[in-house]
Amino acid sequence: MFQESYTILEFVFVGSFSDTIITFGDKYGNYSQILMTVKRIMVCLDGSKHSLRGLNAAISLAKESDATLVGVHSDTSFSAFSAVRAPILPEKKWSNEAKGIIYGAQKKVEKSKIKFEGVVIGGHSSGIDLTTFANNPRNKIDQIVIGSRGMGFPRELFFGGTANFVLHKAKAPVTIVK
């Protein structure tokens, strides 16, 4: 699509969140614009109060754009090999914890009359799993919303940070809710 030397300079919402003009620029002063329509918003779910704040923000965005919410939970109890592929688990293989997270989100989203798809992916590291899912063209993710604990620089330096990883590795625009 664009070379790595391009940087996103500006987002302009046209009328609503569903129509967004993104301005790209490079170090030579060349600019380009594209119109992006948001149809599928991925919201990262782990059951924490932070992910629920992210879900609330995603619901608001989906209402504005008439988008479908794709709630994704990463079940990290799988092997390191599966993290490379981030396979989508069939519903019958979901843990009770994953069922509670996805069904709870689905109930909340459907009260707002928004389409919802619940997905549980199996892997080893949430950041890698979520980014792999979001970057897969078959999933058609236009926007990502993720809650953040906001641990701060010192702890994130040693422990990483799922939101930080997704922000830097995902191809779709990322909204971090604190």
Image (tube, helix red, strand yellow):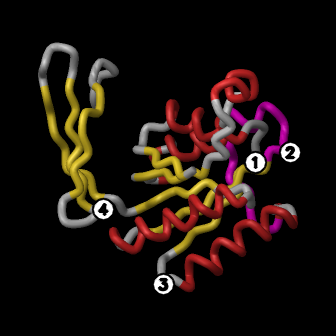
Residue topped by disc 1: 122
Task: Look at discs 3 and 2 and give the one toward the viewer.
Answer: 3
Q: Are marks 1 and 3 in contact (CB under 8 Å)?
A: no
Residue topped by disc 4: 17
**In front of the other: 131 or 14:** 14
Task: Look at discs 2 and 4 and give the one toward the viewer.
Answer: 4
Sequence-first disc among 2 and 4: 4
Is residue 85 among the parts visible in the rendering? no
> Cα distance, mark 4 to mark 3?
17 Å
Query: Which residue occupies 23% across, 43% down?
Result: 22
Magenta range: 76-92
| Residue type at tag 4 | Phe
Sequence-first disc among 3 and 2: 2
Q: Are marks 4 and 3 in contact (CB under 8 Å)?
A: no
> Cα distance, mark 2 to mark 1?
7 Å
SS class of the residue under badge 3? loop
Residue topped by disc 3: 113
User: In the image, residue 105 lies at what x, y percent?
Assistant: 65, 71
